[in-house]
Image (cartoon, coloured by chain):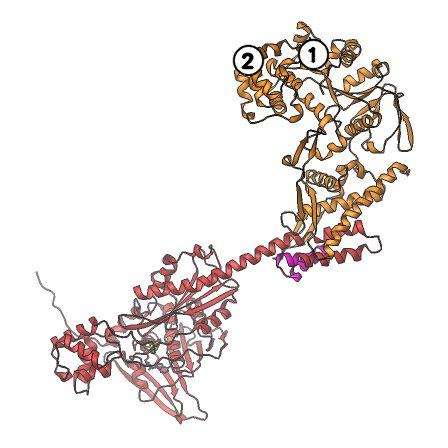
Chain colours: A red, B orange
Amino acid sequence: MSELREVYRAVSPAEFFYKYREIAGFANPVRAVYQTIRELVENALDATDVHGIPPDVKITVRKADETQDFYQITVEDNGIGIPPNIVPNAFGKVLFSSKYVLRQSRGMYGLGVKMVVLYAQLTTGRPVEIITSKSGYKRIYYFKLRIDVNKNEPVVIEAGSWRKTRDWHGTIVSVTIEGDWNRAKSRVLEYLYRTAVVLPYANIVMVTPENEIVYYPRIVNIMPKPPVETKPHPQGTDLEFMNSLVKNTDFKTIEELLVKSFQSIGDVTAKQILQTAGIDPNKKPSELSDNELLSLINAMKTYDKYKPPSSRALSPLGEEIIKAGLKRAFNPEYVDAVSRRPGAYSGHPFIVEVGIAYGGNTPIGEDKPVVLRYANKIPLLYDEATDVISEVVKEDINWENYMISFPAPLLILVHICSTKIPFKGVGKESIADIPEIRREIKLGIMEVTRGLKQFLSKKIREEEAKRKAEAVAKYIPEVAKSLAVILADESNLNALRKEIISKLTTIVARKTGVSFDLLHGIVKSIEAEA
Amino acid sequence: MITMPSQADLAARNKALDLIKSSMKSLVEQINEGEKPVLVIPKRTLSNTIYDLRRKMLLLGPEVQHRSFTDVNEAKKFMQTLLMASIIFDALRNNEYPTIRDLYYRGKHSISYRTVDGKRINENTWEEQRESDSVIRDLEVFLSVLREDLLILSKEKGKVVGNLVIRSGDDTIDLSKMGHGAYAIEPTPDLIEFVDVDAEYILVVEKDAVFQQLHRYGFWRKYKAILVTSAGQPDRATRRFVRRLSDEYKLPVYILADSDPYGFYIYSVFKAGSITLSYESERLATPSAKFIGVMMTDIFGDSVFRKIVKDKDSRKILEEITPGVSELKPKSPYLDESERSNFIIKAKTKDLERAVELVGYKVAEVCIEDKEVKNKVKKKEGLTGYPWFSTPEWTREICIFFNTLSKLEIEAMASKGLKFLADKYIPEKLSVGDWID
Ligand SMILES: Nc1ncnc2c1ncn2[C@@H]1O[C@H](COP(=O)(O)OP(=O)(O)OP(=O)(O)O)[C@@H](O)[C@H]1O
Ligand SMILES: [Mg+2]
């Protein structure tokens, strides 16, 4: 029996993702189109609203080849732009990112746009083109590059710059991929539409290959407060992070390192932690042994008197923005939203926001509300069934208690923002069931739904009053005519009849609390027929 | 051809027009003051029907209903009531004589309106005649008049012959000169004027056939009677006619009906009024009317009953219900054994139930022998009977009915011989005073 020989080698991250692109959402030509647009748009939005800039985003999809299904996808933003020396790595080196800091943003892995570039390379072989400039720069920079898959390095094919004639800042990224636009189109439109719901402060335009223009104009002048970069919370740390921290620090003592590198740790807390871990506070960080590092992390995690993680790193939408977005999308009879107080799980802060829309053009939920899910302002379209938000809506809320019987025109929007969204996969499509988050989702939904219940019961009371008034008002003309026949002569019959009609209408309006005009409308509808 | 209404007719019309006008005026006054219009109508329910022991008639009690236009549950009835008032008013003014069926058709039309949510709906003022009839009755009690006073006609049913001259319309009619026929009592008996009467009493016969036989026989001439028939359940006109004639000429009224619970009830309608139309009693009932026959004792004598009260317990119970029942004058029958077996009809469960309604369950319990039959009326156990049947005489009559489970039609008496009926049965009973008051 011969033994097979094992061959060992390392692959670059670029090579890995090149091979296993489906984990990153590029499983087929349909998903690829959708995923490309998503990655580019999310980068564009991160470059704008995260920095307090009201986003202007333009997406253009163009057929790029007569015979093959090649599409050129271009996304332009008015964001902060990218320094020219950074551009090659940002677009050509997998796992290179400006977003590895504690601050809420859409991007988090340093992977997104590189997947796009790799997919373009794989299917059309065409390089990515970038045009960018920052505010205050005198020039606009231009790049054409590809990725060396084996080395995980950018290969700049062309670079240049020209003078700026106006103070433009922003980025234009253009790629050409092979994809199935026709089947992806509805997904893409759905994605944009859902994005626009939570971004009423953005201008979003898309031009399709059919030359259709989809436009969501800015409708509010408020912006979510931008996130502020924060230090990590000690409960959110791990061995890897601590390792690199102690190796690369300039701080003289471990105590100083703890106090300066983490939130919620002061002198007293640092001393206590180090005592529990049995480490001398004056020890040089780089001299900690592996065992000491382990017991330090243990002590940091078990200490239970920290202040909760700061929510300054978060950028919730806010109630007004959610309401404005829902109003535009559904023109509902009832709309409300709530931003819950910040919470935390495993040292990561999070905020749950819930919006509700009822009636108007709100889509009908057959046996539960229609759910719009968002994580850090990204709409989640796929894997709805396995998402914690869907589970709460289905299992944790007794809708009958809120006077809602399905089918009903009811929609629930849930937005979770966090410095670390507990996604179930790299595809960023569904959120894992974290008890702390699940609880906040439930409470948020209950809070907005209580308001809806009040609205509905008031509405039912009003409808009831209207129906009662109608049941009386419809007889007013007949009663008035009968009385006039008995009490008036031919000559003033009509005058008396009209007088009685108007007086009876007033009386019925007063008795039922329904408006005179409404009742008058009923009376007139009878007169018109007669 | 246009016929002028008679003077009496015109006067009645004007009176009715004024009545409707003034009652509706107060409604419009409420409206003018910004108040919800309300019709206050005496309640026509069984619970608001009371038997006035002193006046010996069924009357409407004091309960009233407030039919408010702004009350969702009353609005339609309110509208219907006013609609009916206006149609009647219109008919009065145009010298018309609508029947209740006419009024139903005149008022029936659809109201087409748009609902608050924009749907167009057609709704009829009323669907069935039952609804319009009901508001006519409401209007009668509301205005406290009879429909006849509003010149609403109904089918003629009652007939009369006798030495009696009346004016109807502008004609004078001698009711002794009707040939083989008879005068059909008009639906508006209050418009009749009695000109001359030569009679000693009024005999009301339930059955039209017997009326005709007595008429042809010349009964009324020979015995100085006014002969009336209601041809079954008496209509309002017949009752009003009898009442007026008896009132105005102080004539006693005798009722000759079938010997069964229905016949007994017809008698009581003449005398005390009907339960469903108690609001009319005041004008329609003749409390002095007497039941002359056919009595159970006319058929069976009183031996059956005497046997029952021989039993101490039975006597005690019956005495408790109507004291003196065991000491009534003895009576011998008009029919012999073989006649009885020829003429008697077996009582049905319906008859038994009706009888229990008249005198109460206890009488049935004591007098019915057959256990199986007793079980049939068990479901009426709670009933105590009508107060106006609570007399020793009626207890004896109906006890015999329960015991024998027999009934007899007046026609049977005529079959025994018209001569017997006209010359013996009726005159003899009248002369000895063998009636029930
Ligand atoms: N339109 C843009 N404007 C400004 N900077 C951009 C833009 N697009 C990309 N970048 C920069 O390039 C970096 C890499 O982008 P990439 O999409 O690969 O990763 P990411 O957005 O950080 O994380 P993720 O993998 O979750 O998308 C970003 O971190 C950002 O600094
Ligand atoms: Mg990205």
Magenta region: which residues?
A508-530
Q: Quadrant of residue B416?
A: top right
Query: Horizontal placement of B318 versus A58: left or right?
Result: right
Residue drawn 60% across the image and 18% down it: B319
> Relative to residue A473, is residue B231 depicted above or below?
above
Residue drawn 36% across the image and 57% down it: A395
Query: Horizontal placement of B43 versus B1: left or right?
Result: left
- Amino acid marked by disc 2: Lys
Which residue lies under the disc numbered 2?
A: B312
Camera-nearest residue between A425 and B57: B57
Q: Quadrant of residue A88?
A: bottom left
Please report, as a chain letter, where disc 1 is located: B
Q: Earlier in the sequence, mark 2 or mark 1?
A: 1
Percent x, y of residue B355: 62, 22
C-alpha distance separating marks 2 and 1: 26 Å
Dot 2 alpha-carbon crowd within 10 angstroms: few under 14, some 14 to 19, many 20 or more: few
The answer to whether mark 1 is within 8 Å of ligand 1 is no
Percent x, y of residue A294: 15, 74
**Observer able to see residue B171:** yes
Give the structural element (helix, strand or loop) at label 1. Answer: helix
Q: Residue furthest left?
A: A1
Please report, as a chain letter, where disc 2 is located: B
Residue drawn 55% across the image and 12% down it: B311
Dot 1 alpha-carbon crowd within 10 angstroms: few under 14, some 14 to 19, many 20 or more: some
Is there a contact, CB below 8 Å, between mark 2 and mark 1? Answer: no
**Observer able to see residue B125:** no
Which residue lies under the disc numbered 1?
A: B298
Of discs 2 and 1, which sits in the foreground?
A: 2
